[in-house]
Structures are given as structure tokens and as C-alpha cells.
Amino acid sequence: DVKVTQSSRYLVKRTGEKVFLECVQDMDHENMFWYRQDPGLGLRLIYFSYDVKMKEKGDIPEGYSVSREKKERFSLILESASTNQTSMYLCASSSFSTGSTYQPQHFGDGTRLSIL
Amino acid sequence: AQKVTQAQTEISVVEKEDVTLDCVYETRDTTYYLFWYKQPPSGELVFLIRRNSFDEQNEISGRYSWNFQKSTSSFNFTITASQVVDSAVYFCALSEGPGAGSYQLTFGKGTKLSVIP
């Protein structure tokens, strides 16, 4: 089974802090993703990466950056945390897909981040 | 731009009732992929099913079935004889697929299903 591990289930930080959320997958997947989930808004893509050191902006990248130095690890960084970044953050990974074998994304348990 | 609409925000059913979760999508692509995910209270999204746009065959897996209709741009999900363990938030999602150079999923806002014993 695919295992996507997020470093923390719950995290409390203060405004202005630099926050790191870590995600590790054990299936040698090429693609990794960071989403945030808010009530009434569903899941929104922040950033994704399809290879080491590669990154692409999603729908809501403002206030975030990412790092992918190794294939198995994808970090989300809040450069200067603000209260409107209080949310549930979900990491996902998937393998490279071709044609009809489009591979689904597999998700971690999520990190519930509170910015005070 | 692609869009997924799950008009039902919350549904409550009594155990053993059948329930259908609606999903309507919009895309300009002729090749796309549709997904359903389940998010139980524990928080992890669990992949349930993927359908390709060129395969309209409906699918059944135990108590779960999916009805894909391109004519109405819908991909509905039915749970037969619901159980308390089915209580969760269910998300429908759409991707234009790797052929379009995109791996992004567009999610609906989810439907919260509560199955009452």
C-alpha cells in the first residue's frame, strides 16, 4: 500500500513565524502535491511537483513556497505565517501516468495548522 | 477552466437506506478523468474510483456503484444499504489528465454523508 506521511497531525504556530510542513512518500512517486482544505471551499491546490527540484504553482500559491530536494520528500513552507493560513493541509503523491493508466493521487492524514 | 459541482452539502439517511451523491463537472477537454474520494472523520482522503472520459461503462463494487453520463456531464455515486461506517465527506474530482500536461485535480466542495443507526 502507498504510504504518505505528514510529519504532524496538529501544529500551533504564531503569526510571523516561518513554518515547515513535511511530507514523505514511500512509493517512489514522481508527483507530489500540497492542498489546503477549508470548510465550504473543499480542497484547493497550493503547489505541486513532478520531479526533484521542480515545482509548479497551483490555484492558491500566495504566501507559500515549496522545496523538493529528494524524490520522496516535499516540504511546504509558510514564509511568514498569518492567521488566514489556519487550515487543514493535505499532502498527496502519484506516479507518472500515461494515457488510460492515469494514476490516482494518494493522500496523507493531513496536518491541522493553527496560526495564533 | 474545469469545474466540479457537488450541489448536496449535507445528506442524512437512516441505516440501510440507499443514497446517491451527485457530481456535475465542466471541462473543455475531450479526454479527462473523474474520481471519487472518501474522507472519514480521521481526515485521510481515500481513493474510491477513477473513470476515463472514453469509458462510459458504469461500475459496481460491492455496495458502491457509479453512474457516468457524458451527455449530462455527471458522475454520480450510489451507496446501497448504507451503513454507519459510510459516514464521511465524499469528494468528486476532475483532471484533464497527463495528455494535457496537467496532473492537477479539481475538487468539488464535498458532500457530508451522515448515516444514522
Image (cartoon, coloured by chain):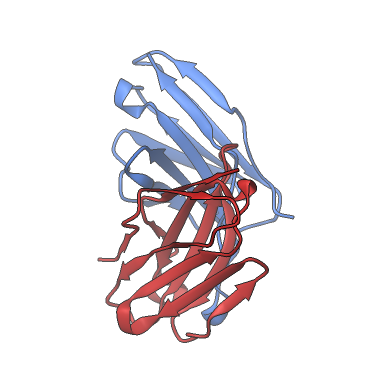
Chain colours: A blue, B red
For image coordinates 45% across by 51% down, the residue present is A48
Q: Is residue A82 above or below residue A34?
A: above
Left or right: B86 with respect to A36?
A: right
Residue A28 visible in rendering: yes
Residue at (35, 48) in percent of width and height:
B9
Query: Is B69 on the left-hand or right-hand side of A112?
Result: left
Q: Residue at x 36, y 82 (%)?
A: B70
Q: Quadrant of residue B47?
A: bottom right
Quadrant (top left/top right/bottom left/bottom right) for the C terminus of chain B: top right
Q: In this rendering, would A71 be left or right of B90?
A: right
Where is the N terminus of chain B found, in terms of image quarters?
bottom left
Q: To which quarter of the image does residue A86 belong?
A: top left
Residue A22 at x, y = what percent?
57, 34
Residue B92 in the image: state x and y as whole percent. Answer: 43, 60
Residue A5: % across, % down:
65, 40
Q: Tell me if I can see residue A54 in this picture.
A: no
Percent coordinates x, y for residue B108 in the rendering:
37, 55
Q: In the rendered picture of this protein, how many numbered marks are placed on residues?
A: 0
Q: Nearer the viewer, residue B41 or A52?
A: B41
Q: Nearer the viewer, residue B23 or B100?
A: B23
